[in-house]
Image (tube, helix red, strand yellow):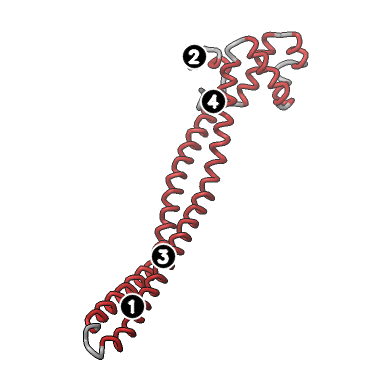
């Protein structure tokens, strides 16, 4: 599998791009986590409300238990205390609901920010995968005469005329005649468009 180009400039661009994409992933995780944490902090009032409601319920229940056995007083005081306990329970439920809503919003915002930032990396990754696929295939093709001729045909169908004219006055005719030199140079045009060198692809060591 070919991961990087032979041409120094293009290879440098690919390495820098890969390192930038990796750094962007780390930054994305950090920012998404920060968003989740900061929005999640808004749940603090809900936690305090829940705690106050629970404390009110416990204290009312304890007071009710203390007066229940007092003759002539227990029933009169117990009912209001029970109502206060129920109110505390309701307040606690409101606090829990607030925390749940804030938690959901924090998660959705963190995911949204993360997805938006990751889309930038995905564009780069898609381009890199497409290049790796084409370059690996070109390496395999350039290892044989038939593959080199196919690379030359691709150059004829893809490369601009300005790239083909230096190869031969009639590059298509040269390809049809099986002109080995022209075919090799056309194949090199296709490989050059990928940042590859034909000499290296067929097994020669480049300096």
Residue 135 percent coordinates (x, y): 57, 24
N-term-proximal mark, 3 vs 4: 4
SS label for mark 1: helix
| C-alpha gap between disc 3 and disc 4 | 56 Å
Residue 11 percent coordinates (x, y): 51, 29
SS label for mark 4: loop
| C-alpha gap between disc 2 and disc 1 | 85 Å
Of tags 1 and 3, the one toward the viewer is: 1
Residue 46 percent coordinates (x, y): 39, 69
The local crowd at label 4, few if under 14, some if 14 to 19, many if 20 or more residues have their Cα within 10 Å, is few
SS label for mark 2: loop
Which residue is labeled 4 in the image?
7
SS label for mark 3: helix
Of tags 2 and 1, the one toward the viewer is: 1
| C-alpha gap between disc 2 and disc 3 | 64 Å
Residue visible at 50% across and 16% down in the picture: 206
Residue visible at 32% across and 72% down in the picture: 54
């Amino acid at each position: 599998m070919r991961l990087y180009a032979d041409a120094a400039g293009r290879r440098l661009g690919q390495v820098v791009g890969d390192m930038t994409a990796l750094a962007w992933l780390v930054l994305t995780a950090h920012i998404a986590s920060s968003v989740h944490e900061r929005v999640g902090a808004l749940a603090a009032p809900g936690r305090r409300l829940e705690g106050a409601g629970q404390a009110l319920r416990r204290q009312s229940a304890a007071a009710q238990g203390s007066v229940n056995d007092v003759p002539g007083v227990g029933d009169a005081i117990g009912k209001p205390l029970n109502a206060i306990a129920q109110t505390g329970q309701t307040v606690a439920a409101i606090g829990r609901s607030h925390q749940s809503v804030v938690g959901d919003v924090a998660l959705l915002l963190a995911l949204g920010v993360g997805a938006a930032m990751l889309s930038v990396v995905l564009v780069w990754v898609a381009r890199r995968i497409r290049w790796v696929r084409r370059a690996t295939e070109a390496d395999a093709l350039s290892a044989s005469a038939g593959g080199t001729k196919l690379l030359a045909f691709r150059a004829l169908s893809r490369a601009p005329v300005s790239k083909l004219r230096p190869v031969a006055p009639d590059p298509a005719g040269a390809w049809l005649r099986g002109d080995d030199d022209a075919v090799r140079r056309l194949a090199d045009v296709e490989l050059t468009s990928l940042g590859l060198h034909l000499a290296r692809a067929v097994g020669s060591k480049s300096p």
